[in-house]
Amino acid sequence: MTDLPPPSPTVMPVSATQLAAGLASTTVPAFITGPWEQGMPVLWVNAAFERLGGVGVDDLALLGPHSLLALVNDDPSRAEAQADIVAGRSMQRIVSARRRDGGITWLQVDFNPLPAGEGEPTYWVGLTTDVSEYVDRQAAQLASLEIERQQRADLDLIAQTTELLGDLEYPLALRDIADLLRSLVPWSGFYLNDDGLLYAEGVDVASPPSGRGRRHARYVPEAWQGDRLEGDLVDDLGLEGVGVGSDHVQDLLDGTVDGPVRLDLERVYPAQSASGWLRRDLVRRVVDESGAIPRSVVVHAVAGRRRVLGLLVTWHGDAGGDLGEPPPQPDPEHVETVVEVVARRAGTAVDNARLYAREHRLAEALQRAMLPEQADVTGLDVWTYYAPNAEHAQVGGDWYDVLQISDGTVGLVIGDVVGHDVEAAAAMGQLRSVVRAYAYELTTPGTVLDRVDQLVAGMRVPRPASMVYATLHHVTEDDTWSVEYTRAGHLPALLLRDGAAHQLSGAGGSLVGFGSDPRATSREVLRRGDVLLFYTDGLIERRDRSLKKGLDTLVEISGRITARDAAGVGEELLSRLADAPEDDVAIVVVRVPDPEADHQVTALSPRSRRWLLPSEPASIGRARHAVLRTCQAWGLTDSAAAELVVSELVANGVLHGWGNIALRLFDTGDGLRIEVEDANPAPPVATDGHPNRLGGFGMQIVERLADWGWRPSGTGKLVWARLRPNPAEE
């Protein structure tokens, strides 16, 4: 038998008296008002309402019509609520109300019309709930979210700044960082103290790492001594005011104040002071960019390890003139913290980049100074090459020398000191000097090396070294050459002849300074067209193969070389063996010219050549000879124009540049391209000659024969020229 549900209890009607009693005794504040048209007078409130607001009906009556509105603070949705009441619609709002004790309470108000007959006025019943705790908790959560959002934005800004600072070779790194900061401030910009303050969009890594260049004058009239700005220029952020009698911007650059400082742009400063110069530049620059007129800016130091390198200037939107109220800005203290972090990171990055660039230049200068340029050898075609491993600090122990000892006698040495540091470079410099001294005194290679062993043993050179020393002798009777050589633990030179490569492996011995027995000397007779190849182990040494395997590969590749000039032989070797060297590479190629055979066949060698020339007048002649040999090897007939263009470009580098001069030649297929690089960044200019003296027409000559241009290259420039085709050949 199925169980039936119990019968529903009888629903008893609730009387109006019971409803009124329940509403009066509830803990929920409640009230009843009259109609809107009568000013909504408060007709009744329960005890909970009196406890919440501290007022009763009589108190509210004293406040006049719409007395409840007097208890509510400014409500942005008041107009919308009034529209609902006038239309007789229920509504729910969260409002803030003033308590009698002066405190603020957040209330959720439910306001509903009481049923009324047709044509009768509408009365209203209201229920209120204290939601202060909820509102406070929500406000705290929103504030926490806002803080987290701001922190994330700051971290993102600093991360982007760090990424930009990681590539200071990008010419607009500082400009992009200033643009990032403009999410916090209306304007910001960097100034670097490179030979005086200069607005900077990027970093010149060639500038001194100290950042101290020309100082702005600090003349301050006696009448201005001790004057200080007062008032709003010294605020609660601890900013130091800059008055007309002080130059705190210069103090910031000198590091005598920590900063930041505030610079008043409505003041006038000594014309030659750092503050005066910065004020003039900022007034022009900020007005140009934003159209606003700043009253003052905040100046942060961009500090390196030992010196202040420049300034980071920010404007916080305190504009003068008739621009109206500026838009609301983030918390100033928060902004200053972010700006200070960015300035500090920028200073460290700039200082590191400049220190690295300086060490790089010093190391390269040291290495190049210890690798002398080859002598201009008469009767031989000589090409030299050196490239340090990019993983090292451009300081190593590889070296070579080509010496014109006397007419018809050429000395040649190539060596390798163990290591890739300054000590190795110092040992290399000592050995180079010793070998040079004995090479000019003695003629037999074995005897030279014996004397070197004796002196090196007494000098206690800290690093072991290997080398090959050779002398080439010209036999004038039959116009031939011979070579004598000795080896001290170094890889054998190669003799390239008739499509085959032979190792000159005779006269071997121990490393320099360790020889106890007399050094031997071997001899070979050279024919026309023969090539001697001297090299260091960086050309063939690889982690994935043995040194013997690398030597076998070199012998095989050298036997297939088709170039008919020393530079071409070197370029073929580099293209096949030195794409990614794992060590320093030094190469010396010596070729005995063969005038008859060289004109018969155009060799299929790489169509590029390179030389490194010292900045001296003799390099102009060497460059002319180099281009003539190259045109001959490539079968280019217009060698006269190429010789003239190369001569003018290299002469410009010698006269107006400094440092070594790099010469490169390329056969582009539609003309010879010539590139000359030097360390002077100033571009070449075609002139109408020098008044009252000879010269000045070099670039005009180049313009007649070639299309030309230039571009920045490292700390200097590269000038290029492409010869126009000869109309007679077309």
Image (spheres, rainbow, N blue to C red):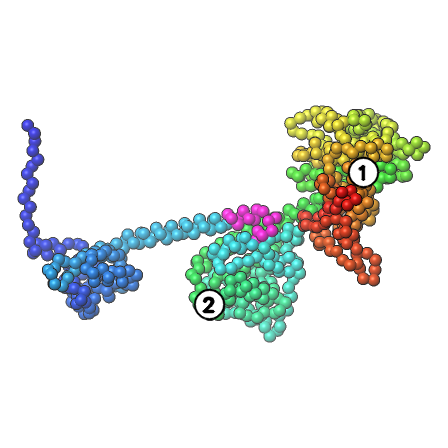
Quarter containing the C terminus: top right
> Quick one: which residue is furthest to the right in this view?
477
Q: Does residue 170 show up magenta in the picture?
A: yes
Q: Amino acid at mark 1?
A: Gln
Left or right of residue 15, residue 716 in this image: right
The CA distance from mark 2 to mark 1 is 74 Å
Q: Would you say residue 29 is visible in this rendering?
A: no
Q: How many marks?
A: 2
Q: Earlier in the sequence, mark 2 or mark 1?
A: 2
Magenta-highlighted residues:
159-174
| Viewer can see residue 19 | yes
Instruction: Name the side, left or right, on which 99 lies relative to 161.
Output: left
Q: Is residue 341 magenta?
A: no
Q: Residue at x 43, y 52 (%)?
A: 150
User: Picture quarter containing residue 220?
Assistant: bottom right
Q: How far across and down, in percent of the image, does residue 645 sit?
A: 78, 48
Would you place residue 685 above or below residue 64 in this image? Answer: above
Query: In terms of image quadrants, where is residue 407?
Result: top right
The amino acid pointed to by label 2 is Leu
Element at label 2 = loop
Tell me the crowding category of disc 1: few under 14, some 14 to 19, or many 20 or more residues within 10 angstroms, Cα based. many
Residue 495 % position (x, y): 80, 28
Q: Which residue is mark 1?
A: 632
What residue lies at 79% left-to-right and 44% top-to-bottom? 728
Q: Quadrant of the N terminus?
A: top left
> Is disc 1 placed on a helix, strand or loop?
helix
Within-10-Å neighbours for mark 2: few <14, some 14–19, many 20+: few
- The residue under label 2 is 323
Q: Nearer the viewer, residue 354 or 3?
A: 3
